[in-house]
Image: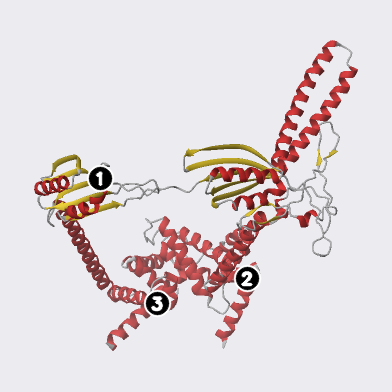
Amino acid sequence: MIEQKTIMTEDGIIRRCQAGDREAFRSLVEQYQNMLYGTAYLMTGSRMAAEDQVQEAFLSAWKGIGSFRIGHPLKPWLVRILVNKVLSYHRTNPKTIISIDTDLVADPVGDDLAEEIERRDQLQRVMQSLSEEQRQVVLLRYFTGLSLAETSAALGRQQGTIKSQAHRALEQLKNLIEDDNKL
Amino acid sequence: MTDDKNNFTNIERKVQSFFQKQATSLKASKDLWPKIEARLDEKVTDAGAKSTKRGLRQWLVGPRLIVASTSISAVLILIVVGSMWLTTNHPANITPSNILVRSGIEHGAAPQPTIVATTTVAMPTSTAIVAEPVTTTPTVWGLNPSGGTVFGPINSNSTDSNSDVLDTIGKQVISQASVSLEVNTVSTALSQVETMVQNLGGSVDSMSSNGEQNQEQATVTIRVPQDQFLTALDKLQSLGTVQNQNITSQDVTQQYIDLQAQLNSAQLEEQSLQAILAKATTVSDEIAIQEQLTQVIAQAENLQGQINYIQNQVDMATITVTLNEPTQNVGQPPSASLSVAVSNVDSSLASVKQLISGVGGIIDSSSISLNNGKESAYLSLQVYRANFDQIVLAIGKEGKIQQKTVQEAVTAQNGQAQQGNSPPDASISLSLIESSGFWTTTNILVISITGGVVIIALLVFLVLVGKAGLLRRRIS
């Protein structure tokens, strides 16, 4: 019941956005910015690039919101826009390598620095053990929280492919996580 | 299997919780919205337009696109065809814009709107002059009743009867035609043409005739009044069989009007110069004005000449008539060209020579050549017409005929048959070529190249098919 109410509210917000209400769009940005930023950061490995891509994605969303069909979930739509932005960013900056340690430390939002560094190491280990494609799938499935179909749509790959990539990634992560008791 | 599944679910859960932990530290900077908002302001006008475009693109999918493009093309075709029809067929559109035609009442129909024809031409002397209406017979566009050709003006009586109602500046159209006729006797036809031209009030411009006896040809250029143009053509057609007819009409109205305007301006200039000349006090002034006056007069005369020429061409249509007599048979001997593949060129050559001398024929030339080990002989023969068919048949039997062209005899019209005393004039040109089997060098070469290409193509195909199969298997 509560969920339905939320959807209704979001639809209302989208309608207002479609009418050009920037305040409504602000509420959407605030709602989704962390999720999108996290995804972008884990895909690019750079805080700056992540922020740029999130900005671009929101601007594209604002431009395209007129054609958004009310009633459909907004989150996968936003993620798809972001993924496209990041992928095209990767195309123009092919040398970007995921190295988590660059700027996460600069602005620690976590509890304390030691914990932050530990977390960062784990994350780097996990991300680097996967291939680029697997990393994207794992991110969207388990970090962003998209369904199989939504991940498939966002990455433009077949559902079967996503399934097998996720399967292989998890198999790889299994050992890593089992070795690491902290996970 | 179930174990494995549970196992993966656990891992999935673990991975998910791992990422959730990460999420707490991954937060977008607080100034993200102001940054976005600043750029939102820049592009907000763009947004609407682009989404409309995308909306249109989404709408124009599938059958809608086909329907839309079909209707757009149909409309375009209609516009193009319509404008073409209007520019080519509609008489009103052929009328230059500065000439307005006052229409008459036809068949008791409601009176057409009447437009007075005036052409205003700006004059150098800054006086506007109304050009004099040029009165010619009205122009009606229609079909040639005999030939069905679309052509120029027909000055029919029905429109003439309305001439008191019509105050028309007709179009200045030069009509020309050329007719080629086959007649029994050129001289008779010539006199008929002359009589006809005189009756129609025209004149014969030029006449030339040439040719041998029984094959005479004549070309006559006649001028007939514009309103007799069609009648003249009809009458000419009745003189013989029409071989070729070409009718053209050229609208020179614009040119005519331009010349008239130029003439008027020249005449005005002449008048003013005359006035200035009368007032001139010094000799040098007088000389200068006189010089200018001479130029203006010459220009006016030149213009008048051009106008007169056009007027003459318009008033009198020109018809060029070519008269031919039917082609006569002068009698031609038969001739043949033969190419025969024989097993032994020498023996065949000997037997042909024997055959020719046997019937009293002449061997004009004979040559033997050897090319790539193959012998061939070329003969040029003359035989009597009576023996021609028989000889051609006999030569054909020497081997396999590869090529044969026979031109049959044409009997002379006076029935004169060729008899004993005339020389043998039926010519035969003969090539005797040594025949070869199927396995010639060329054939072997062609077969081996074709075979090679086919085998390579097959191999490439098989490799591609194999690769595709492998790829598919690897993918699956």
The three-letter code of the residue at mark 2 reads Gln
Secondary structure under the numbered disc 3 in the rendered image: helix
How far apart are the alpha carbons under marks 1 and 2? 111 Å
Question: Residue A181: horizontal and vertical position, in percent?
Answer: 31, 76
The three-letter code of the residue at mark 1 reads Gly
Secondary structure under the numbered disc 1 in the rendered image: loop
Question: Residue B387: horizontal and vertical position, in percent?
Answer: 23, 51
Tell me how the rendering is colored. Answer: secondary structure
Question: Residue A61: horizontal and vertical position, in percent?
Answer: 55, 67
How far apart are the alpha carbons under marks 2 and 3? 34 Å
Q: Which label was assigned to residue B251?
A: none
Q: In the rendered image, which residue does mark 3 sit on?
A: B16
Residue A168: quadrant of the picture:
bottom left
Quadrant where the C terminus of chain B lies? Answer: bottom left
Q: In the rendered image, which residue does mark 1 sit on?
A: B420
Q: Point out the frontmost of discs 1 and 2.
A: 1
Residue B276: quadrant of the picture:
top right
The three-letter code of the residue at mark 3 reads Gln
Q: Could you classify mark 3 by the number of other residues whose Cα lies within 10 Å: few (under 14), some (14-19), or many (20 or more)?
A: some
User: Disc 1 is attached to a residue of which chain?
Assistant: B
- Name the residue: 22% across, 52% down: B392
Q: Could you classify mark 2 by the number of other residues whose Cα lies within 10 Å: few (under 14), some (14-19), or many (20 or more)?
A: many
Quadrant where the N terminus of chain B lies? Answer: bottom left
Q: Which label was assigned to residue A18?
A: 2
On the rendered structure, is B9 left or right of B253? left
Instruction: Please tell me if label 2 and label 3 are on a single chain.
Output: no
Is B433 or B129 nearer to us in this picture? Answer: B433
- Relative to residue B338, is residue A10 depicted above or below? below
Q: Point out the frontmost of discs 3 and 1.
A: 1
On the rendered structure, is A51 left or right of B13? right
User: Disc 2 is attached to a residue of which chain?
Assistant: A
Return the disc, 3 or 1, that comes first in the chain's sequence. 3
